[in-house]
């Protein structure tokens, strides 16, 4: 599946994460990190952009592309409130939503673009599904499990920062995702 960033209808890419510097570069912020990378990869920052901040979300809108990049600011477990409110406000269908999130069911370096498929445990994804009243939307699942033999619960692990080696590898992984799944071509 290819996602055209300049589709004729409005498209929303919602990256999941937690707001604040405390959570920067944590595994749980993979969705935020990917949106930042995608913006640089496609040089979207040079386009006309409208930026909006509210208590629910940060939003960049690229009118020429009909593209919204949404970062909920409600903390992970309440992400659905921000996503649902925005889709309702703009009257955007869930079929035009791509939810981007970390996934402990996938090893670090792996990723999947799937419809209606989620990790076994992910409170942010479950919140979005609950608030939207459906599971029928696309998700970009970014693998973050790199625990090997570490005995650490998932909830604690995803709130840890990526290590130095992982941070060096992320641009390669994000580039591969961009090249495989996204395009600006007509």
Image (spheres, rainbow, N blue to C red):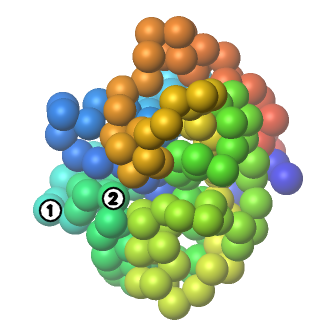
Foreground pick, 151 / 121: 151
Whether residue 149 is visible here, answered yes or no, is yes
**Horizontal relation, residue 123 to residue 178: left or right:** left
- Badge 1: few (under 14), some or many (20 or more) residues near its Cα, within 10 Å? few
Quarter in which the C terminus is drawn? top right
Q: CA distance from mark 2 to mark 1?
A: 14 Å
Foreground pick, 140 / 62: 140
Residue under label 1: 55
Determine the secondary structure under disc 1: loop
Q: Residue at the spot x=65%, y=72% of the render? A: 137
The reply to whether the C-beta atoms of the residues labelled 2 and 1 are less than 8 Å apart is no
Residue 119, by quadrant, is bottom right
Q: Residue at the spot x=17%, y=60% of the render? A: 54
Residue 154: x and y, percent? 46, 48
Q: Earlier in the sequence, mark 2 or mark 1?
A: 1
Q: Residue at the spot x=36%, y=44% of the render? A: 156
Residue 104: x and y, percent? 58, 47
Whether residue 182 is visible here, answered yes or no, is no
Residue under label 2: 76
């Amino acid at each position: 599946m290819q996602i055209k960033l300049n589709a004729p209808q409005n498209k929303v890419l919602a990256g999941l994460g937690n707001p604040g510097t405390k959570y920067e570069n944590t595994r749980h912020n993979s969705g935020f990190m990917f949106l930042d990378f995608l913006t640089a990869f496609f040089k979207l920052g040079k386009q006309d952009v409208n930026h909006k901040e509210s208590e629910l979300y940060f939003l960049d809108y690229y009118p020429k592309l009909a593209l919204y990049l949404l970062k909920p600011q409600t903390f992970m477990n309440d992400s659905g409130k921000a996503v649902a409110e925005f889709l309702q406000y703009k009257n955007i269908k869930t079929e035009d939503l791509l939810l981007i999130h970390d996934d402990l069911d996938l090893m670090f370096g792996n990723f999947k673009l799937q419809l209606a498929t989620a990790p076994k445990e992910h409170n942010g994804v479950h919140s979005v599904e609950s608030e939207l009243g459906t599971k029928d939307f696309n998700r970009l699942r970014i693998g973050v499990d790199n625990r090997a033999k570490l005995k650490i619960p998932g909830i604690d692990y995803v709130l840890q920062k990526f290590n130095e080696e992982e941070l060096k590898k992320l641009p390669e992984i994000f580039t591969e995702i961009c090249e495989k799944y996204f395009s600006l071509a007509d």
